[in-house]
Amino acid sequence: MINATKKWMFLKVSSIILVPLMAWFIINLVSVYDKSYVDVIIFFSTQPSKFLTSLLMIVAFFYSSLSISEIFEDYIHDEKVKSVANKALTIFAIIIPLITIIIIFNLTL
Amino acid sequence: MSKENPLSPHIQIYSWNISSLISISHRIIGVINIVALTLVCLWIALLLLGETNYEYIKFFLQSFLGKFLILGLTWSFSFQILSEIRHLFWDFGYGFELITSKITGLIVIFGSIVLTILIYLSSKQIF
């Protein structure tokens, strides 16, 4: 399987996972965003929110990294700039969800 | 063999129609959503500052601007959800006919508005 096909497969599989996760998250975010500190902590630190939010972060940033690299491919002409942009994107897509998941798993009242 | 790939034509070359509008919106909203999700990560990180400091964040989120941002995020998520489903149908070989493509495009546009209203009202337990 060539790399472009692999990338397409990863995009589609992550998209199938992402659709229900995004729906679940936005419904719950609207319910909880203006609640008290305790309510927000309870939401993020209990199951299934803890697991589903962590999964959302991993899949969403992975999906974004793949799809934004397609935007770079289409619109960035300079190969060096494109390479740096793609590397920065990959680092961003690993670090942000990783830090967030560590925080979620350490939230306590 | 040249390593220079052909670049996509710039979007202003084509005349606008529903398909092109949804296509470019899908990309732009995808980027907006990942920026918004990064802000959600920041919001989660700010919980570490404790209950007293969180009062400032809560004050902002309960303000008009805070509610507007959440409503905007609900719409952009709704748009991406519907647009992704449209793309997935295409991937399985359905919906390529011109009329079907226009109808599903309109469903994405108007459906995202309806979905935003439904999610917001149901989350606030208005119905």
Image (cartoon, rainbow, N blue to C red):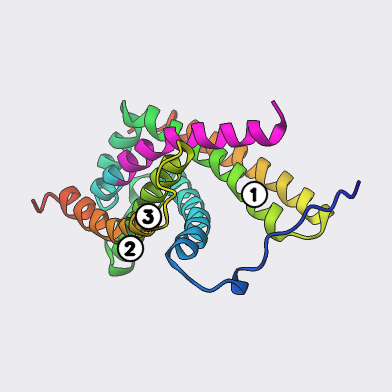
- Describe residue B35's horizontal placement relative to residue B57 as left or right: right
- Circle 1 crowding by C-alpha within 10 Å: few under 14, some 14–19, many from 20: some
In the rendered view, tell whether residue B104 sits above or below residue B18. Answer: above
Q: What's the residue type where badge 1 is placed?
A: Glu
Q: In terms of depth relative to the viewer, which is nearer, B47 or B10?
A: B10
- Residue A20 is a magenta residue: yes
Point out the stretch of residues depicted in magenta.
A1-26
Residue under label 1:
A70
Q: Position of residue A1 (x, y in %)?
A: 69, 25
Outermost left residue: B127
Dot in front, 3 or 2: 3
**Residue A71 at least partly seen:** yes
Residue lying at 31% horizontally and 39% vertically, measured from the top left: A24
Write down the residue under mark 3. B79
Question: Considering only vertical position in the picture, is A58 above or below B80?
Answer: above
Q: Residue at x 78, y 60 (%)?
A: A77
Dot 3 and dot 1 within a common chain: no
**Residue A30: percent from the left, percent from the top?**
27, 50
Read off the chain for label 1.
A
Residue at mark 3 shares a chain with residue at mark 2: yes
Comparing labels 1 and 2, the label whose residue is closer to the camera: 1
On the picture, is B44 further left or further right than A33? right
Question: Which subunit holds the residue at mark 2?
Answer: B
Q: Which mark is residue B66?
A: 2
Q: Real-space Cα distance between discs 3 and 1?
A: 20 Å
The secondary structure type at the circle numbered 3 is helix
> Does the magenta-highlighted stretch encompass residue B43?
no
